[in-house]
Amino acid sequence: MMKFRDCWALRLEKVERILAEALPGRHEEPKLLHEAMRYSTLEGGKRLRALLAMAACEAVGGDLKKTGGFAAAVEMVHAYSLIHDDLPCMDDDDMRRGKPTNHRVFGEAVAVLAGDGLLTQAFLELARMPEKYGISAETTVRVVEELAQAIGSLGMVGGQVVDILSEGKEISGETLEYIHSHKTGALFTAALRGGALLGGCSERQLELLTIYGENFGLAFQITDDILDEVGDSSQTGKAVGSDREAGKQTYPHLYGLERSRELARECVQACLDALEEFPAQAWFLRELAKFVLIRES
């Protein structure tokens, strides 16, 4: 069996190629907008959401080639969310993935529009799945619904609003979990569910992968909170302590570092438990869950 890191590298290369082809070229008008869209989407990030979509498809016995358009779409959505999250009216961050944030390079107005453009381009790519990847109309509609539900007011956008409203306040563990499960976890879960649907999953498999996604997202965000406190900025690509300085509540602030690490381990174990009924093809999903605990960025 191929080693985890080697498989990651191969799939990462594939995702980068699909993204580069799916995005408008930087020489297409308006050039500045398309350059900004590509700047925040290409050549950066771990592509976890695309990898989860591909791995979920694989775990249910599907064809990885079927996930190309969806993998590109979830990464475009993620890039759009980061551009908007970094804006001065949101988190006002200067660095992202080790380079200046979009609005620092292109200005606030273009950054907002680049995010808008990426979100729209994501759904254009989804609409092209029947033609480009041979996905049935019925499955396409269901995948579009999954993603739209996950990133709207009941998902990612809703989590961002509660995050903003909670800045500088003492909040409960339940509210913090709501923020993380919606702002971050919802897109992870949608990536898994969409990939599974493209692979022809059963309802039982979809249910188990949803459990995996919810716990994966929470483990990822708890680890992110820990890295914000004790991480290396050269590895994380952003300033350490930025959440604390912004008045954001985090798991280490609420529970302490050791309990936060314990909670992350519990979530990862829940991911592994959810995969017990899956065959050997789910090995990459298992390794991705374990990766969350050892990542440095």
Image: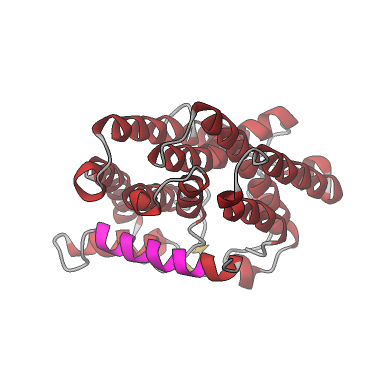
Residue at (70, 52) in percent of width and height: 223
Counting every numbered tag in the picture gives 0
Give above or below for 235 relative to 203: below
Residue closer to the observer: 100 or 179: 179
Residue at (38, 33) in percent of width and height: 148
Query: Is 125 colored magenta in this rendering?
Result: no
Which quarter of the picture shows residue 34?
bottom left
Residue closer to the observer: 25 or 244: 25
Which quarter of the picture shows residue 217?
top right
**Which colour scheme appears in the figure?**
secondary structure
Residue at (23, 40) in percent of width and height: 127
Give above or below for 206 relative to 72: above
Q: Is residue 240 visible to the viewer in this orientation of the structure?
A: yes
Give above or below for 144 relative to 235: above
Residue 82, percent across and down? Answer: 46, 52
Q: Is residue 89 visible to the viewer in this orientation of the structure?
A: no
Give the overall secondary structure of the magenta segment. Answer: helix
Residue 27, percent across and down? Answer: 17, 68
Residue 46, percent across and down? Answer: 52, 61
- The answer to whether residue 256 is left or right of residue 29 is right
Quadrant assignment for the C terminus? bottom right
- The answer to whether residue 226 is left or right of residue 46 is right
Query: Is 10 colored magenta in this rendering?
Result: yes
Q: Which residues are magenta?
A: 9-23
